[in-house]
Amino acid sequence: MAKATVKKQAESQSVVLDDVKAYARKIWLAGLGAYSKAGQDSAEIFKDLVKAGEGIEKKGKKLVHQQVDAANSQIDSVKSSVSGVKEKVEVQLDKIEQSFDNRVASALNRLGIPSHQDVAALSAKLDQLSAVLEQVSRNK
């Protein structure tokens, strides 16, 4: 009977060992299957992600172009406003300069200091007199 018990234990251990081997093989095959499936699915997922990325990139570029165009139009409107203001300032400066010149000329005139026009007129008269004197001295 001892031999029968040992034989039964050996058979039961053999069955358990066979079950463990079968289970280990199933785990191994499940791992291989998961790796294979992940490889196949990851390629499809990657393609989907690329498509989604392209769509987002297009939307982003469109948004950036819209914002750049809006900024450029604002810059153009500011430039036109600045040029209008610049022209008004130049007109006002010209008026101020003319007013200043008139007041300085008036003050100099009151002090008896001749203006540039007066000096130019006197210079022209001196030139005429010099020409006449030369002509008279030649005729003598």
Image (spheres, helix red, strand yellow):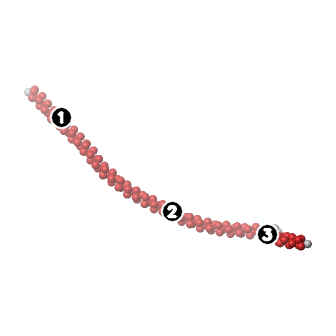
Is residue 65 positioned above or below 124 on the image? above
Q: Assign a secondary structure to mark 3.
A: helix
Q: Residue furthest front?
A: 139
Q: Is residue 21 left or right of residue 134?
A: left
Select label 3 or label 1 by which is in front.
3
> What percent of the width, then of the height, locates residue 21?
19, 37
Q: Residue furthest left?
A: 1
Q: Residue at x 23, y 40 (%)?
A: 28
> Where the N terminus falls, by quadrant?
top left
**Label placed on residue 120:** 3
> What percent of the width, then of the height, locates residue 63?
43, 60
For label 2, the residue is: 72
Q: Assign a secondary structure to mark 1.
A: helix
Select label 2 or label 3 by which is in front.
3
Q: Is residue 64 left or right of residue 110?
A: left
For label 1, the residue is: 17
Q: Quadrant of residue 89?
A: bottom right
Q: In the image, what residue type sits under mark 2?
A: Asn
> Who is closer to the viewer here, 53 or 110?
53
Q: In the image, what residue type sits under mark 1?
A: Leu
> Who is closer to the viewer here, 84 or 40?
40
Circles 2, 3 touching at the beta carbon (< 8 Å): no
Q: Earlier in the sequence, mark 2 or mark 3?
A: 2
Select label 2 or label 1 by which is in front.
2
C-alpha separation, residue under disc 2 versus residue under disc 1: 79 Å
Q: Residue at x 17, y 36 (%)?
A: 18
Q: Residue at x 29, y 50 (%)?
A: 41
Q: Quadrant of residue 122?
A: bottom right
Q: Earlier in the sequence, mark 3 or mark 1?
A: 1
